[in-house]
Image: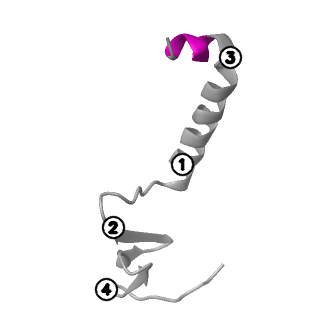
Amino acid sequence: MLALARKVNESIIINDNVEVAILEIKGDQVKIGISAPKSVPVYRKELYVQIQEANKEAVNMASPESLSDLLK
């Protein structure tokens, strides 16, 4: 993991097209802004984990018979 120190109104660039800017610091909270193309999904980690778990459950619930019915 790369750890960087940034101040308010400073930012980092990821992969030439994603900018992460520090907008505000209040106590132990940091407000960040993320500029990315619409094709790049940006999620809070806890939401991303929920999506991944739901996708795994959906795959596990799908039986080979129900998948073959979709192809008919």
Mark 4 or 2, closer to the camera: 2
Q: Check disc 4 and report the residue beneath it.
A: 9
Q: Rounded to the nearest whole Å, what is the CA distance between mark 3 and mark 4? A: 53 Å
Question: Would residue 11 be found to the left or right of residue 63 on screen?
Answer: left
Q: Looking at the picture, which amino acid does disc 1 mark? A: Tyr
Specify the principal SS of the magenta part: helix
Label 2 secondary element: loop
Q: Earlier in the sequence, mark 4 or mark 1?
A: 4
Residue at 59% x, 34% y is: 55
Q: Check disc 1 and report the residue beneath it.
A: 48
Question: Would residue 63 be found to the left or right of residue 25 on screen?
Answer: right
Q: Which residues are magenta?
A: 66-70
Q: Rounded to the nearest whole Å, what is the CA distance between mark 4 and mark 1? A: 27 Å
Residue at 55% x, 54% y is: 45
Residue at 44% x, 78% y is: 15
Q: Looking at the picture, which amino acid does disc 2 mark? A: Ala
Marks 4 and 2 close (CB-CB < 8 Å) = no
Establish if 31 lies above or below 49: below
Q: Rounded to the nearest whole Å, what is the CA distance between mark 3 and mark 1? A: 27 Å
Q: Quadrant of residue 60?
A: top right
Mark 1: few/some/many CA within 10 Å (<14, 14-19, 20+): few
Q: Earlier in the sequence, mark 1 or mark 2?
A: 2
Q: Check disc 3 and report the residue beneath it.
A: 64
Question: Would residue 56 be found to the left or right of residue 41 on screen?
Answer: right
| Residue 67 lies within the magenta run | yes
Mark 2 or 3, closer to the camera: 3
